[in-house]
Image (cartoon, rainbow, N blue to C red):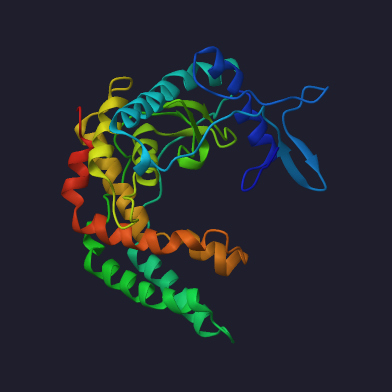
Amino acid sequence: AKRLLDVQADAATRSLAVAGYLAEAGVPVPVPLSTKTGETVVEVDGRAYCALPWVEGTQPAGAELTVAQVRSLGAVLGRIHVALGPAAEKAGLSEPGATVDPEIPDPVVAAGEANRFLALIGSLPDPDRFDLDVVPTLHRRMELLEQYRDERPAGGAPLGPAGWTHGDFQPLNLLWRDGQVAAVLDWDRVRVRLLAEEVVRSANYLFATADGTGLDLERIAAFAASYRTKVPLTRAESDDAVHRMWWKRMTEFWILKFRYDRADSSCDHLYPASCAVLEWWTARRAQVREAFAAGA
């Protein structure tokens, strides 16, 4: 069973409805279990839950995958994007008037958030090691925001097709068995997004280097090229998605929001690597674009 967080029960129900149709299309998906009355989401004491059949498998990090496995994974994501449209239609999902025009964060607003967290940490009566370590990273982030403020992506609609997407295609939602993807998990966040955005976001989480300081460009290239065997994606579309994702990483503070605004420290361990990857990516933006352009 899984407790559903950060997603409303009705939205999760709609998203989970696609699983059966995806399984019929050959996508490795565990079909959610239903109650006697046909419900896939149950609310208990104000909390929403879903249940899925047990699937045997392991969850290797992207750096542990062979290049051949990475190619297989890129094809799986492509197959998902191809199959999701018909599956969503059969499941009765619709997003009337849905548009994909993501907000482009303002560097001044992002710097203000950095200052807000600095003030919060400064007000703590007994800051711990994590708090103290965050302070220099926030000062560094403000330096980067000032240095690259003119690199903010241009306004207007992003390039490339939009469609139904998984929403969180990353190592913890993938089970492997015998060298193949045995199951793609967590289908409660399905919605319309830019397809290229999911490719870039997924690769960002999947292919951090083993030491957590950068991105594995060889594996990203294999992933992107294999994805393109299922879904056409032009060089311009991937370049645009890569630029927007880099800017999002530059301006977001979601881990700190969890810790300081929600009192949720469960993602603290991700923060040092997120800062290191941003520094690495910023210094190698052209190389990252080239990797994602593989197969275009």
**Which x, y percent locates residue 26?**
49, 14
User: Is residue 92 in sight in this rendering?
Assistant: no
**58 and 36: which is toward the camera:** 58
Q: Does residue 210 sit above or below 19 in this rendering?
A: below
Q: In which quarter of the image is residue 139?
A: bottom left
**9 and 67: which is toward the camera:** 67
Q: Does residue 204 sit above or below 271 in this rendering?
A: above
For this orientation, the residue located farthest to the front is 178
**177 and 98: which is toward the camera:** 177
In the rendered structure, the answer to whether residue 35 lies left or right of residue 287 reads right
**Which x, y percent locates residue 171?**
46, 41
Q: Quadrant of residue 62?
A: top left
Q: How many marks?
A: 0
**Residue at image location 49% in from the left, 73% down from the top:** 130
**Which x, y percent locates residue 255?**
49, 61
**Residue at image location 32% in from the left, 62% down from the top:** 276
For this orientation, the residue located farthest to the top is 24
The quadrant in which the N terminus is found is top right
**Residue at image location 44% in from the left, 62% down from the top:** 271
The quadrant in which the C terminus is found is top left
**Which x, y percent locates residue 141?**
33, 69
Q: Quadrant of residue 107?
A: bottom left
Q: Does residue 274 sit above or below 140 in this rendering?
A: above
User: Is residue 236 in sight in this rendering?
Assistant: yes
In the rendered structure, the answer to whether residue 283 lies left or right of residue 24 reads left
**Residue at image location 35% in from the left, 63% down from the top:** 275
**291 and 39: which is toward the camera:** 291
